[in-house]
Amino acid sequence: MEQGAHAVSSPYVPPQPLTLRINGTEHQLDIEPRVTLLDALRETLHLTGTKKGCDRGQCGACTVLVDGQRINSCLTLAVMHDGREITTVEGLGQQDQPHPMQQAFMDCDGFQCGYCTPGQVCSAVALLDEIKQRQASAVTEGEQLEPASLSEDEIRERMSGNLCRCGAYPNIVKAIHSVVLRQA
């Protein structure tokens, strides 16, 4: 250390009490405030369906729903979601009765290695709500989006935050489109 330089130390911040409502179940935790939601889900609560891909918010493998909105759980702190409704891929359906989007991914072979699939599915479920609410995207034409006229370009735009290293995009789009058409 140079003469005159002072060591900088981070002040200790004790774990904070926190209630995370995940997949309909409340979890009372004492968690260090710098823990990401992703790490709280995977390391503390052992909900490992949500994947750590890039850990920088660029790949979407960690996508979960918070109050129905998709977020990258690697970019947000767990303490920021005290009392909010969090849905992970584990909370979308049951093993004997998967969510329609999970079933469509299986029916349409919307995955290869499967690593990105939990984030893709969570993002696609949020997409369904966006379509129902007729929310516009960068490629939406006209003032209102009609679910029955949802284009592949529209789906690709809305799913652009979720990457698939295997390149299963055509089948992912097909899976999402099939669910949208069934719900239209």
Image (cartoon, helix red, strand yellow):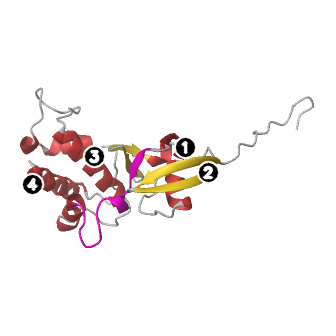
Which secondary structure dominates the residues rendered in magenta? Answer: loop
The vertical placement of 9 against 86, above or below, is above
Three-letter amino acid code at the position of disc 1: Val
Specify the farthest residue to the top.
Answer: 143
Are circles 1 and 2 on residues that touch, CB within 8 Å? yes
- The circle on residue 31 is 2
Tell me which numbered mark, 3 or 4, is placed earlier along the sequence: 3
Mark 1 lies on a secondary structure that is: helix
> What residue did someone put label 1 on?
79
| Residue 165 in sight here | no
Relative image position of residue 177 (x, y in whole percent):
14, 52
Q: Which residue is mark 4?
A: 182
> Residues in magenta?
84-99
Q: Which mark is residue 113?
A: none
Q: CA distance from mark 1 to mark 2?
A: 8 Å
> In which quadrant is the N terminus drawn?
top right
Secondary structure, mark 2, is strand
